[in-house]
Amino acid sequence: LKDIDLNLLRLFDAVHRHRSVSRAAEQLDLTQPAASQGLTRLRGLLNDPLFMRAAGGVEPTPKAQRLAEPVRQALAAIEQALSETAAFDPAASE
């Protein structure tokens, strides 16, 4: 876990949802080579190809399928935690 960058998980999620490295790169404002390089890093860290070429894009491996929902939930939880801001209510402030 110490070697996994949060952006790699965002990339994984985008590739899984779009079934395309190019479309995932576009969504994340990355170049296609940068997305491919990130995916290569993640493949090495997880010791799995994660996605295989298929007609019109890529298909997830069984390991990628198992990881997809937990990764999506973790990213959503992080996003929610970071977006929560205590609203300042001057009437309630002491």
Image: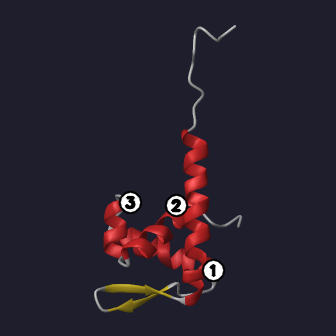
Numbered tag placed on residue 79 in the rendering:
none
Inter-mark Cα distance, 3 to 1 = 21 Å
Q: Earlier in the sequence, mark 3 or mark 1?
A: 3
Left or right side of 94 for 83:
left
User: Which residue carries the number 2 mark?
Assistant: 7
Foreground pick, 53 / 70:
70
Q: Position of residue 8 (x, y in %)?
A: 53, 66
Q: Earlier in the sequence, mark 2 or mark 3?
A: 2
- Residue at 56 percent across and 58 percent down: it is 75
Numbered tag placed on residue 28 in the rendering:
3
The total of numbered circles placed on residues is 3
* Colouring: secondary structure
Q: Quadrant of the N terminus?
A: bottom right
Q: Is residue 92 above or below residue 86?
A: above
User: Which residue carries the number 1 mark?
Assistant: 46
Could you tell me the amino acid type at mark 1?
Leu
Inter-mark Cα distance, 1 to 2 = 15 Å
